[in-house]
Amino acid sequence: NDDDERYPLTNIEENTLMNVEPIGADLLLETYKRKIADEGRLFLAEFQSIPRVFSKFHIKDARKASNQIKNRYVDILPYDYNRVRLSTSTDGSDYINASFIDGYKEPKKYIAAQGPKNETVVDFWRMVWEQQSSVIVMVTRCEEGNRNKCAQYWPSMDRETEIFEDFVVKISTEDHFPDYVIRHLTITNKREKSLEREVTHIQFTSWPDHGVPGEPHLLLKLRRRVNAFKNLFSGPIVVHCSAGVGRTGTYIGIDAMMEGLEAEGRMDIYGYVVKLRRQRCLMVQVEAQYILIHQALIEYTQFGETEIHLSELHSTLNTLKQKDLGSETTLLEMEFQRLPKYKNWRTCNTATSEENKKKNRYSRLVPFDYNRVLVKLEDEASRESDQEDEDYSTDEDDEDFTKYINASYIDGYWGPRCLIAAQGPLPDTRADFWQMIFQKKAKALVMLTDCMENGKEFCSPYWGDEKMVFEDIEVEMKDSNSCPAYETRCIEIRHTKRKESRKVYQYHFPRWTEQHLPETPGDLVDMIKSMKQKFEYDKMRPERNMPVVVHCNDGSTRTGLFCALWNVLESADTEKLMDIFQVVKALRKERPGMMLSFEQYQFLYNAVEQTYPTQNGEVKQNHAAGAAHVVDETEEAKKGQPEESAAGGIQEGDTNPKASEQAEQGVPSAGARTEGGGKAESQAGEGAVAEPTTTSEDTKTSPEAEGVANGPDVIVEL
């Protein structure tokens, strides 16, 4: 018949397969380096050797005329032999575009499905009911790039209940987090007298429009959330994106290979992707997704599990404070030493150019090019003053109309560019500093130094008791208040050309020890709490167009500690989870000199320990931490990748999927904590980056940053 002529039974695909050996945990990093070399030539060869479709498996049922309306894409169809069969629905068909997928050892552990269409929502819930699935993993948004990717098949909180023919679906809670949404649903079947069933719906919202997630540890985090809700007695985990092959296959591949790694200390990634393609066509759809599976496993083997639930905080810290067997080094010190330094991982060309050297207080602590803050020239800024987000553009054309400032965007817990890390202004950069604050619409300004310390200028005064003028910005202090550990000032800034006035609230925290630590953790936590109450950061997600500006003398040493504590507390308050390791690792990728000392790293743990003390064996939040408040995620905050795209590299516009920074990662389950299976390489080296030195008096190396930094130089420099 036509189907057999179009898809003849043949083993020709088998001849293209390569003999790729399973990889031991201790060889994973070395293997990755070898395969990613030469623009990923070996990865590409492996990926292209796997047939997109194994034509020896029939695809007839999906092509029936009556079923075609149930398929989202004409070329992504389930094989007949392992498709999920429904009890006959109202149209008499047992068809749904979904396939049973075997796990690492467990048969039919997953169901890989396309995202429901409006016409198939009833069939989807029938499948969930009949297969007794208790967890649904959704790896897409309903709308991405003005394209419909998936129907919303669950009730919204304002409706609470939706009826889909025989199935009544209710929603009880919907909790939004930066990278995912967790919904608790119940489903009942009007035709059966059985009790209602609970279904946990976990939607991953951080897959970008193009490429793959920039941080593989986010998928390990997703895996932990899913496994926390998996019931041993329930049916398969339902995983879907839009087509049910690319992102779906990537998540399943990571989960299954993590099982193999945990059970045997090795993984057969190539062999498992071949197995996935035998069970559903095009699983792991593009090369970048195939590479991402490797990167996620490297993340785990290099760094292990570092996430802690607050309920286990104190017992985990007691363990971390113990010394390793036969060593004088504590487990916490060993964890710190595993942090990569990201030495020379990004360029700092603008900051180190001849014309800008004089604008740097220290030659070694300057912003990377990729996330430096752009301050528009005044004529250009005035021309675009009505734009709501005038600063959020990194086009090369825009850089022609900007001037340099030693400041870096820092990602916050809720999203990108929530913070700005800046050096203390020099006498000649104070005008640029205020222009930055004005253009970026900052309302909160954190100062972590005195203007003079030990006879040295750490920050040129940029406000005073009397009105001060810096080019087009007038600065006038309106009010000040002293707290036991910090001062607050209300400063009015007026743009004389634009005739606009704004109020900026400065939080000045001067109490630091010689090790650049606050005298007590509670003081800094109290100040952060005060800021969040003032600006209602606990009630609304801080938008990228009103970042918190944080500065010390060099924009890294004390500033890095503040930014880390800010993000750690946000996570702890919102999710009751903290991952200090990942927070610090992210900061080191965003600005040189961040969190280089073990004393600072240990301080973060001590701060959280004091903020969440135990009482009767339970964690009790004290006065220093604000109440947890879950907020809705804005639509424009995160976007996903069109899965059908045949291309797709790893984020960062100028970085191809073979040359991404993602080679140095790792982390799995909340609650448990393990060390990585592999050891970090290249422990030698000093500092955070190596920039050209200068002879200028204003560009001496910061005394705080001269110590030897821990950890490997970027574990895989891509």
Image (cartoon, grey):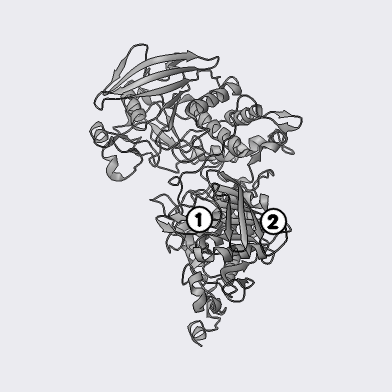
Q: Earlier in the sequence, mark 1 or mark 2?
A: 1
Location of residue 361 by image quarter: top left
Residue 599 at x, y percent in the picture: 60, 28
Q: Nearer the viewer, residue 475 or 284?
A: 475
Label 1 sits on what residue type?
Answer: Thr
**Residue displayed at 56% across by 73% down:** 91
Residue denoted by label 1: 140
- Label count reads 2
Of the residues tagged 1 and 2, which is closer to the observer?
2
Is disc 1 surrounded by few (<14), some (14 to 19) or many (20+) residues within 10 Å? many
Residue 416 at x, y percent in the picture: 45, 41
Q: Nearer the viewer, residue 278 or 3?
A: 3
Q: Nearer the viewer, residue 361 or 204?
A: 204
Q: CA distance from mark 1 to mark 2?
A: 27 Å
Location of residue 390 by image quarter: top left
Label 2 sits on what residue type?
Answer: Glu
Q: Position of 494 compared to 287: left or right?
A: left
Question: Answer yes or no: do the residues labelled 1 and 2 have beta carbons within 8 Å?
Answer: no
SS of the residue under disc 2: loop
SS of the residue under disc 1: loop
Residue 243 at x, y percent in the picture: 50, 64
Residue 418 at x, y percent in the picture: 45, 36
Q: Is residue 677 above or below residue 565?
A: below
Residue denoted by label 2: 196
Location of residue 98 by image quarter: bottom right
Is disc 2 surrounded by few (<14), some (14 to 19) or many (20+) residues within 10 Å? some
Residue lying farthest right? 616
Q: Is residue 485 above or below residue 49?
A: above
Q: Position of 715 compared to 266: left or right?
A: left
- Answer yes or no: is residue 211 visible: no
- Answer yes or no: is residue 331 visible: yes
